[in-house]
Amino acid sequence: MKRFYPVYILFITIVLIQVLTLITGKGYMLTQLTMSAYYVLVAVGLCMVMGYAGQISLGQAGFFAIGGYTTAFLTTIDFTEKAGTGLFKLLDSMGLLITKDTLYGDTVIHLSPWISLIAAVLIAGITAYALGIPVLKLKGHYLAMATMGFGIIIYRIVLGSAIFGQADGIFNVPAFTIFPGLELSGDFTSRISNYYIAWILVIIAILLMVNLINSRVGRALRSLHGGEDASDAMGVDTTRYKVIIFVIGAIMAAVAGFFLTHYNGGIGPSEAGVGKSVRYLAIVAVGGMANIWGSLVMGLVLNFLSLRGVFGHFDDAVFGIILVMMMMFMPEGFIRISVLRDIRSLFIKLFSRKKMKETIQEPPHE
Amino acid sequence: MSAEQVLQYIFAGITVGSIYAFVAIGYNIIYNTTGIINFAQGEFVMLGGMISFTFSRFMPLFPAIIIAVLITAAIGGLIEIVFIRRMRKNSVLGMIVVTIGISILLREAALYIWDEQIRALSFFTGTEISSVSVFGARISPQVLWVLGVTLVIVGGLFFFFKFTLTGQAMRACSENSRAAKLCGIKTDSMVNFSFMLSAGIGALGGCVVSPLTQTHYAMGTDLAIKGFIVAILGGLGNPIAAVAAGLILGLLESFSISILPMAYKDVISIIILLIILVAKPSGLFGSKQVSSLKDF
């Protein structure tokens, strides 16, 4: 199917990058590429909300933090005292408890990350649903501020609560064994496998989103973006679709938060900050709003450069400049099909002008 | 709580509320002429404090403040000319993104110029330990300065919008920009002037509160959000109501500290924002009929 060609290209590119880092001996770059993949996931989710449904969200980092903190909290807390209760016996029989010995010889019992993954998705989804129903009635500035307000509440809660480690965050989050032999962790030895875990997750998300865009929901969303009143009049249940896409974006952010927390082995309050939300916004803006592929490419490039420390002290400033410049000069985004078309027409013009000089001939219609 | 303590909380709340009101007034002035929310408004407060601090080392305090207000107003005007003027026809989404970008740029520039240190202007009268007694509560004379300046600005704005030709022209722009243009009002310069005015007011606020709350390069974001809450609470487009709303929010925050941990102070004000946005987006003092014509 034609619409999946870019996915094949993406997969080949991912493999090529990995081979390239192997050949050039720069395997350490895979770490940043893996982290970028998770941030790309958030950006793709936001791209659906902003680009396709036309709803601004400045609370994406909040959902990311919900995912990350849920798993960090559930997989590091010790359940030894409750081990006798029926629920925990059931969990144990399903293999969803992890028993470990500490440094001091005590045994601690943690929940399996599988449970916290479900919990993270559920909490993020329910929060987004509960927030989305009232808030998505708002438009423009009001919606921006309301979602930003949500992000700040999450930030303040994780910063102010002792159970979330306050300013230190939660660390020593265990690795996530997806199945025996494949483990999600920031361990040196599993760098390559983690790189593929991250990007395959992105590919799955993209496949789902491409399908969604080309479905009834996707068409409804685009009509919503074009004109809310018009699509309302055509019988599109605009509120419902807005909430659906908002929940999807939130879940993608939470899943990204979940994976990155296990990959990094911890999470801190800075992940929930407004600055992060603005960063996702910048990536989607550069990517051309309604363009998943643009968000993917720019998310990868910008996050990778930022994580490698290329921007140095000007990290935030770079994102600020990007936001302003994009909106002023290229509100359609940087990555868009028309860029290719512009370049082609430029070549055609140059070429045809040369031709004109040589032979007296009508320039071909562009 | 003793009576003095309550009074102390009230004064603290009024001081904080005045700062929010400064930001909210700025939002409203720009919103009235352009229909956009300038998310960089909090940054003007920071710039006012920082610039006046720099100049106060070479000259007496009051000229330094005047210079800071003028410079910040010029920056506001420049922002309008360079960024906003080109963008005017664009979508609201685009405007939000651009003003957020501008606020990041101003903040990063401030970080570059003034580094991370916290600065404070010296107290206008007396020092940090001098205090005056008001109904038994001990408050810093600076609090009286803050209140005085707030009153002067509110009074001045009321007079300006009601009785001067420029003020009336600006109100005409907010009513109907095209009609105003047909009447010979230069709408472009009115928009520019509104940016300068709100930047100047923000900067003045930043100077007056600097001795009490200190000035830090990153203070703008928080102020921008609080100012927005206040602007919404009072009803967007109404600078005078913003002051009342500012005082309400300031008092709520100030008393919330006595019940809840300090860390949750912001959570309370944002929950107020969410409630007001959902329940009555026209604000406490806004009329329902007027707001039905607006887009929320």
Image (tube, coloured by chain):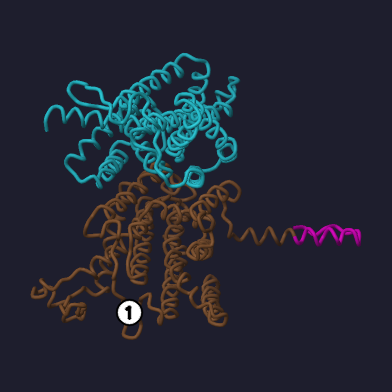
Nearer to us in this view, A333 or A266: A266
Q: Is residue A362 left or right of residue A51?
A: right
A189 sits to left or right of A346: left
Q: Which residues are magenta?
A: A347-366
Which sits in the foreground, A344 or A333?
A: A333
Vertically, is B127 above or below A246? Answer: above
Tell me which residue sits at (16%, 81%) in the image.
Answer: A93
In the rendered image, the residue lying farthest to the top is B163
Chain identifier, brown in the render? A
The answer, for residue A18, to whether it is visible in the render is: yes
* Residue of label 1: A178
Using the image, determine if residue B32 lies above or below residue A285.
above
Badge 1: chain ID: A
Which chain is tinted cyan? B
Q: Position of residue B76 (x, y in %)?
A: 52, 34
| Type of amino acid under label 1 | Ile
Residue A5, how many percent across, how many down? 55, 73
Residue A315 forms part of the magenta stretch: no
Choose top left, top right, bottom left or bottom right for residue A66: bottom left
Where is residue A294, by image quadrant?
A: bottom right
Report the front residue among A309 and B267: A309
How crowded pointer 1 is (Cα within 10 Å; few <14, some 14-19, many 20+) is rated as: few
Tell me residue A366's x, y (percent). Answer: 74, 58
Q: Nearer the viewer, residue A202 or B78?
A: B78
